[in-house]
Image (cartoon, helix red, strand yellow):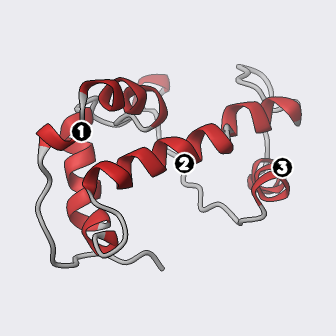
Amino acid sequence: RMPSKCTGSLFNFRKVYPQLRSDLKISWPDVESGNDTRFWESEWNKHGRCSEASLNQMQYFERSHAMWISYNITEILKNASIVPSATKNWTYSDIVSPIKRATKRTPLLRCKYDKSTQ
């Protein structure tokens, strides 16, 4: 379980310096609503504040970006021949297995229903 709802300082946009914002737009974008800043604020306020004893806000977001670089999930899946396709389907296990092999962690994945395809 991830820690959540901890006390600590609230999100401060100024602490996410411009280069870090550019990096996070690539590594940690809001894929649901497109409002990256609001998403980062939510993630910090819910989870990041729990790390404040060891990572301040800037370090928390720098670490998340560094983790993305270390574990490029797109490349991991591509190396397992799992790429976007209009005709090919994969099982949950097909996707989890190469990620688990590469990261030594079991990912938690969820599907997002795409209403535009129905």
In percent of the image, x 25 and y 25: which residue is there? 18
Establish if 114 lies above or below 15: above
Q: Give the residue number, with chain letter if any, for mark 2.
A: 111
Residue 91 visible somewhere in the drawing: yes
Along the polypeptide, which appears first: circle 1 or circle 2?
Answer: 1
Specify whether 57 is left or right of 92: left
Q: Give the residue number, with chain letter if any, for mark 3.
A: 98
Q: Residue 108: x and y, percent? A: 60, 62
Amino acid type at mark 3: Pro
Instruction: Say what secondary structure mark 1 lies in.
Output: loop
Marks 1,2: beta carbons within 8 A: no
Residue nearest the viewer, comparing 63 with 117:
63
Q: Quadrant of residue 87?
A: top right
Q: Quadrant of residue 25?
A: top left
Residue 89 visible somewhere in the drawing: no
Q: Nearer the viewer, mark 3 or mark 1?
A: 1
Q: Give the residue number, with chain letter if any, for mark 1.
A: 16
Q: Residue 33: x and y, percent? A: 27, 34
Q: Residue 17: x and y, percent? A: 24, 32
In percent of the image, x 36 and y 52: which residue is there? 59
- Pointer 1: residues within 10 angstroms few (<14), some, or many (20+)? many
Amino acid type at mark 1: Val
Establish if 26 lies above or below 61: above
Spatial CA distance of label 2 from label 3 is: 17 Å
Q: Nearer the viewer, mark 2 or mark 3?
A: 3
Instruction: Say what secondary structure mark 3 lies in.
Output: helix
Along the polypeptide, which appears first: circle 2 or circle 3?
Answer: 3
Amino acid type at mark 2: Cys
Along the polypeptide, which appears first: circle 3 or circle 1?
Answer: 1
Specify whether 79 is left or right of 67: right
Q: Nearer the viewer, mark 1 or mark 2?
A: 1
